[in-house]
Amino acid sequence: MNAIVSIGSLEVREKLFLLEDYLRQFEQYDFEVKHTFTDGIYAREIFLPAGSMVVGKIHRHNHLNFISRGTVTVYTKDGLETFTGPITMISTAGTKRAVYANTDCVWTTIHTNPDNITDLGKLEDMIIAKNYEDLL
């Protein structure tokens, strides 16, 4: 017997992956991203135009986030929250989120980079988990 599962009963992770899969059917926007490097630090700044939606990747480590301008609504394991910049937040390891830009927004993540890697592919391998099992 097949059970019908309502979206409301799904775990947050499942909902985020379903939303990510759903959004892939639409034209993808090439977001403006600025990468900044300094001794032991990597900063990734993204411009999110009003009305855009992003489902982020799974982060391996705790890191700082700054919203320097704009308002976003964010869905994470903690529920639905709205943030207006300027604001500073900490993301914990394993964070994956959906972000809706209510207004134009500038969001920056700050990651430790002890080996001063500048190759974006290598940095992503260091910072991002391909799935939750990679975090174990």
Image (cartoon, rainbow, N blue to C red):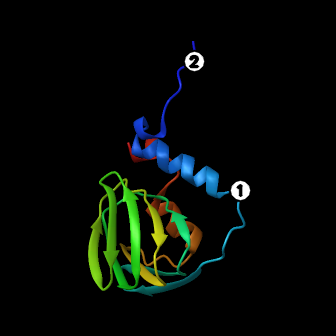
**Residue beneath the point at 28% across and 81% down:** 87
Total labels drawn: 2
Looking at the image, is 23 positioned above or below residue 87? above
| Quadrant the N terminus occupies | top right
Residue 38: quarter of image = bottom left
* Residue 96 rendering spot, x and y as whole percentages: 42, 56
| Viewer-proximal residue among 132 and 121 | 132
| Viewer-proximal residue among 87 and 123 | 87
Q: Which residue is mark 2?
A: 2
* Residue 109 rendering spot, x and y as whole percentages: 39, 75
Residue type, mark 1 in image = Gln
| Quadrant the C terminus occupies | top left
For label 2, the SS is loop
Image-based side of 93 in relation to 29, left or right: left
As drawn, which residue projects farthest toward the top?
1
Residue 119: quarter of image = bottom right
Residue type, mark 2 in image = Asn
Q: CA distance from mark 2 to mark 1?
A: 26 Å
Image-based side of 22 in relation to 66, left or right: right
For label 1, the SS is loop
Q: Which residue is mark 1?
A: 25
* Residue 26 rendering spot, x and y as whole percentages: 70, 62
Q: Residue 45, labelled with which disc?
A: none
Looking at the image, is 43 positioned above or below residue 73? below
| Viewer-proximal residue among 79 and 57 | 79
**Residue beneath the point at 49% across and 50% down:** 16
| Crowding at mark 2 (Cα within 10 Å: few <14, some 14-19, many 20+) | few
